[in-house]
Image (tube, rainbow, N blue to C red):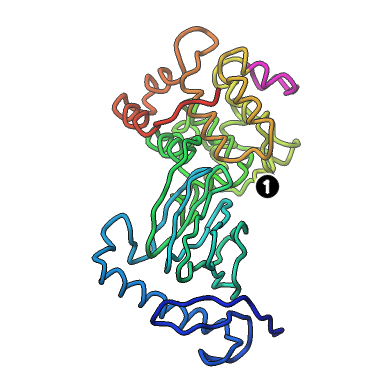
Amino acid sequence: MKKRALAPIAFLAAACCILAALASGGDSSDPLVSLSYLNGTFTDKVNSAVDARLNASGQGSAGTYASSTQEIRLKEGDVLCGSTGTDCMLLAGSMKVTFPSGAVVDITAGKEMPSGTALTANHRYLVAEDTAASFTVTSKTAVLHYEGPYRFTLSDSVDYNAIASALKTLHLFKGSYTGYGSGFDLEMAPTRIQALIMFIRVLGEEEAALSYTGPIPFTDIARGSLSEHYVSYAYSKGYTNGFTATLFQPDQAISANQYMEFLLRALGYSSSANTDLSATMATARSAGVLTDAEVSMLQSGTFLRAQLVYVSYYALDASLSDGSGTLEQKLMDSGVFTSDELLSARAMITGGRIF
């Protein structure tokens, strides 16, 4: 492996001064230190020194020091403030690290990180001695593992994480089988099958879909799967005609226009007969389903599951086209969720809409 010398990193009193580098072999007396040394002796010394300092100062109370790995969902602008010994790993989303002096080490890559650098997902980062580092979320949402001394400062950005939790309480959003971040996958683009399932849920027809066993013409939907129930039901009701006569393309990403068309159909402002989506956003705006700022948000950048849960949640407040009430009232009347569940969900949302 090619050796690459890195800038000196000051260790705690218990540790000696070393130069971090990628190399094969080496130990604490070698100026070119191996990656295994960074992952072992280096971190052990930092952690031991942090523990000693915390014990001496009486710090390390709940809320300031995590003695084991913790997981948290964050939103744009939220900051993990770390100090000597803070250890973190980005699982999803985007973050950057900044610090005025000192060092932050990418333990996975075995190198020191310049201030202002974007984190790499699934890389482990460690804050070195005499360093105060800020790990800031730069995407709409992020999932982070952290350990050691910490403090969070929270922004007033839209909390898509809370909205997803609220929809889960209302049985409208169940997430995936991803083993972190509650399975919400808010950082990913929604697929056609995911959008169709959400559409059926906001119609209040999920139970009917799951019990449906009719045929479908699409060869790319696995027989006997849950997807088959949703797609066959939607096809029988005329909610979807597929991508072609024989293909549904369940894993293809769906656009904001396409998902808003689904919501407009659920509210009665459109139907499956509409194949021209050029006026979808304008229709949603005139019907009061979206604000001008929300239209702009949906039309900029990639449509993510974070935005899918956002528009789905606020569509609950929209009036049905026939004037019979709101989507929220319709779903309660259909038994999708109770008034108590609605109150619990509403209590999770502390911010407002985008205007």
Across and down, in percent, residue 313 comes to 48, 29
- Residue 47 position by quadrant: bottom left
- Tell whether 196 sits left or right of 164: right
How many residues crowd around disc 1 within 10 Å: few (fewer than 14), some, or many (20 or more)? Answer: few
- The residue drawn where x is 63% and y is 42% is 191
SS of the residue at dot 1? loop
- The residue drawn where x is 47% and y is 56% is 144
Q: Is residue 239 above or below residue 146?
A: above
Q: Is residue 71 above or below residue 234?
A: below
Across and down, in percent, residue 31 comes to 59, 88
Q: Amino acid at mark 1?
A: Asp
- The residue drawn where x is 46% and y is 8% is 324
Q: Is residue 184 above or below residue 113?
A: above
Q: Nearer the viewer, residue 197 or 32?
A: 32
- The residue drawn where x is 35% and y is 27% is 342
Q: Disc 1 marks which residue?
A: 220
Which quarter of the figure is the N terminus placed in? Answer: bottom right
Q: Main secondary structure of the magenta part?
A: loop
- Residue 293 position by quadrant: top right
- Tell whether 130 sits left or right of 92: left
Q: Residue furthest left?
A: 58
Q: Nearer the viewer, residue 205 or 6?
A: 6
Across and down, in percent, residue 133 comes to 49, 59
Q: Which residues are magenta?
A: 270-283
Q: Residue furthest top?
A: 323
- Tell whether 140 sits left or right of 257: left
Which quarter of the figure is the C terminus placed in? Answer: top right
Q: Nearer the viewer, residue 138 or 69?
A: 138
| Tally of numbered discs | 1
Is residue 192 found inside the magenta-colored segment of the image? no
Across and down, in percent, residue 218 comes to 68, 41
